[in-house]
Image (cartoon, rainbow, N blue to C red):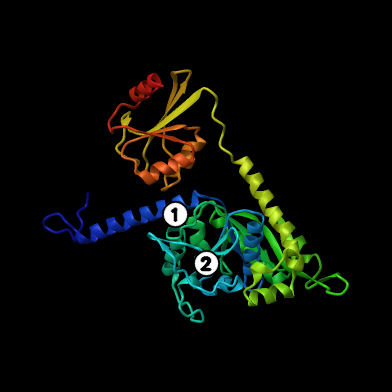
Amino acid sequence: MEKCPHQKEDGSCEGCELLREERQEGQTEDYQIRWTLDQIRHKLLVMSGKGGVGKTSVAVAVALMLARRGYAVGLIDVDLHGPDVYRMLGVGEPLDLVHGQYYLPADVARNLKLVSVEAMMKNREAAVIWRGPVKHKIIRQFLTEIQWGHLDFLVIDAPPGTGDEPLTVARAIPEVQAVIVTTPQEISLADVRKAIQFCQKVDMQILGVVENMGYLRCPDCGKAIPLFTSGQGSRQLQALGLPVLGSLPFDPEVVAAADEGRLTTLETSQSPFLQAMEAVVTQIVEALQQAASQTQPPAREPGTTIFAAPVVDGNLAPQCNQNQRFLLVTVQDGQIVNQLQVTPPDFKPGLLPHWLERQGVSHLIAAGLPENARKLFQRKGLEVIAAEAGTPLVGLVQELIKAD
């Protein structure tokens, strides 16, 4: 191995040590993000190809309508240069509650929690002038230092375009699904194509498109008045192969309520926008339920137990490392019927429980597993068995079978 040119005579190297500490810190942060996300069922990124299409109004309305249906919802405003969600929901005070090292998100309505960069700003009128690395860190802090708890939905309001913020979300939350907001006009639909290309490049699934400000409901006769070319938007979206989740009207009452910070008190019956949003939210919930039913892990066969453990030469490894091989031992009716050594395809921190669950594993044998990691496996329904590193795994499984 080539020697570091900055290495001292005693073999130490301050630069190498700092790099090692940074890598360990990054791995710890990745694990904390996975720990947070594992407690959240569905993650939605509300984005748009351009500004001025009412993306934030849609994101806030989706979160509100989900919360009103009884779901536990979190809302993150990552539009760092133009954060408006706090004002729209009437949140006046910054985050000042601290529990341990975790900040508690603001409770803005029943079942709805919120965090925004505005929570950290003493002067909300000040311009936010940040480069990409700072944005990246702030967004990851929203996932590592905010105590969200168990949520049914996490709704993320991204800034317009395909810049640093949505890219950071895509990398930090690989299972996030996009809801793209547009208006039925050609210039907006052209930018939707860019958003589609972005999602394809970062492997982000598109749940569907919401067509906003498609029409205005006449206050006298109730007739829908198209604000743009009638039917143009839906036809072009369908030509792109995207599911249209719904069309929303321009609603002056929603504009006034957002400006005055009283969206949480605006009743659905008072707003054509919220009435149309009910159908959009129904589409979102049904699409997510359908996708979840198609990706459910296979049911474990009755009378079959699968043990899994990280191994080195057939013996229990001291810990789980990158590219660590696992031995899966299948037991039926008290007899070992199969042994298979495999390497997880994606060994990112926190993803291992999901992979083991998909293999039908019911018991994990491990040495020196931290308590927080143990809880993560247990939440996936895996029984964790502590054992001494270096123990022959097959013999250990046989002992466990006899003791059962």
Query: Residue shown at 36%/39% (left/top)?
Result: 324
The residue identified by callout 2 is 78
What's the distance in space between the residues labelled 2 and 1, CA to CA?
A: 16 Å
Say whether disc 2 or disc 1 marks the residue closer to the N-terminus: 1
Q: In what element is the residue under mark 2?
A: loop
111 or 159, which lies in front? 111
Q: In what element is the residue under mark 1?
A: helix
Let me know if residue 4 appears in the view. Answer: yes
Disc 2 crowd rating (10 Å Cα; few below 14, some 14-19, many 20+) is many
271 or 3, which lies in front? 271
| Image spot of residue 7 (x, y percent) | 17, 58
Which image quarter: residue 264? bottom right
- The amino acid type found where label 1 is placed reads Ile
Let me know if residue 237 appears in the view. Answer: no
Which image quarter: residue 363? top left
| Image spot of residue 152 (x, y percent) | 58, 52
Q: Which mark is residue 239?
A: none
Q: Is residue 33 above or below residue 344?
A: below
| Image spot of residue 141 (x, y percent) | 43, 62
Q: Is residue 182 above or below residue 41?
A: below
Q: As drawn, is 44 to the left or to the right of 217?
A: left
Query: Residue shown at 64%/77% (left/top)?
Result: 259
Q: Is residue 294 above or below residue 103?
A: above
- The amino acid type found where label 2 is placed reads Val
Query: Residue shown at 41%/67% (left/top)?
Result: 133
The residue identified by callout 1 is 33
404 or 395, which lies in front? 404
209 or 353, which lies in front? 353
Looking at the image, do the residues carrying marks 2 and 1 touch, with CB atoms under 8 Å apart? no
